[in-house]
Image (cartoon, grey):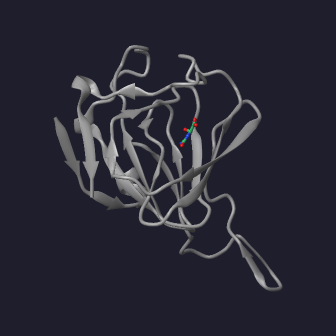
Amino acid sequence: MEHKVIIEDLTGTAFAPYGKVIDLPADEPSKTGDGWNCWSYIQMLDVSEPIGFGLVETQQRAFVVTAMERHVSREELLLTFDREIIQPVACCNDIDDPEEQPDPRAVKCFRIKPGQAIVIGRGVWHSPAYPASEDARYLFAIEKKKDKFGDEMVNPWVDFIGGDTIRFA
Ligand SMILES: NC(=O)N[C@@H](O)C(=O)O
């Protein structure tokens, strides 16, 4: 079965079940200087090990998701380098269940614009992000350590329950 999902704009409130949002701040900067303003800290990444960075070049393709991965032991920072991207996510039901499959009825898709970033929460199912229109590049940062269920495997992808798929628009 194919489930239809409408793309949502990224806001802290809408994304709260899946993690944290970093956006251009509207409040007063905490530090200023000659020609610059600084806001710190605008968000936190909860870590105990060194952080590794990954880069994904995401190419135009159908807005269809068949499988997701999750990191039950680690938060993940993700931000686009250049263009708008779409990030599908779904909450997990039981973070301690290594056999869990993502539930297609739980999927939400968020639009991430240049200047915005997300911190994906521990255990939150996610696919690679998709380019909103043209090919895009995005950066992710995550602790360099083994995850509880070994999601450093070459193929961490888990099909949706029932072999269902998601089509977003
Ligand atoms: N987010 C993404 O595209 N990839 C990472 O989650 C990863 O672990 O590779």
Task: Reply above or below: 49 against 140.
Answer: above
* Rendering coords of residue 129 (x, y %): 47, 49
Task: Reply above or below: 144 against 18.
Answer: above
Between residue 84 and residue 124, name the one nearer to us: 84
* Rendering coords of residue 84 (x, y %): 48, 65
Image quadrant for the N terminus?
Answer: top left
Task: Reply above or below: 65 against 6.
Answer: above
Q: Is residue 105 left or right of residue 31?
A: left
Q: Is residue 152 left or right of residue 34?
A: left
Residue found at the very far left of the displayed protein:
1
Residue found at the very far bottom of the displayed protein:
35
Q: Is residue 155 visible?
A: yes
Q: Quadrant of residue 103?
A: top left
Task: Reply above or below: 77 against 38.
Answer: above
Between residue 106 and residue 94, name the one nearer to us: 106
Image quadrant for the C terminus?
Answer: bottom left
What is the total number of numbered labels drawn onto the structure image? 0
* Rendering coords of residue 11 (x, y %): 41, 61
Between residue 28 and residue 119, name the one nearer to us: 119
* Rendering coords of residue 144 (x, y %): 71, 30
Q: Residue at x 38, y 55 (%)?
A: 110
Q: Residue at x 42, y 43 (%)?
A: 18
Q: Is residue 16 visible?
A: no
Q: Quadrant of residue 54?
A: top right
Q: Is residue 3 left or right of residue 121?
A: left
Residue found at the very far right of the displayed protein:
34
Q: Residue at x 33, y 52 (%)?
A: 63
Image quadrant of ligand 1 equals top right
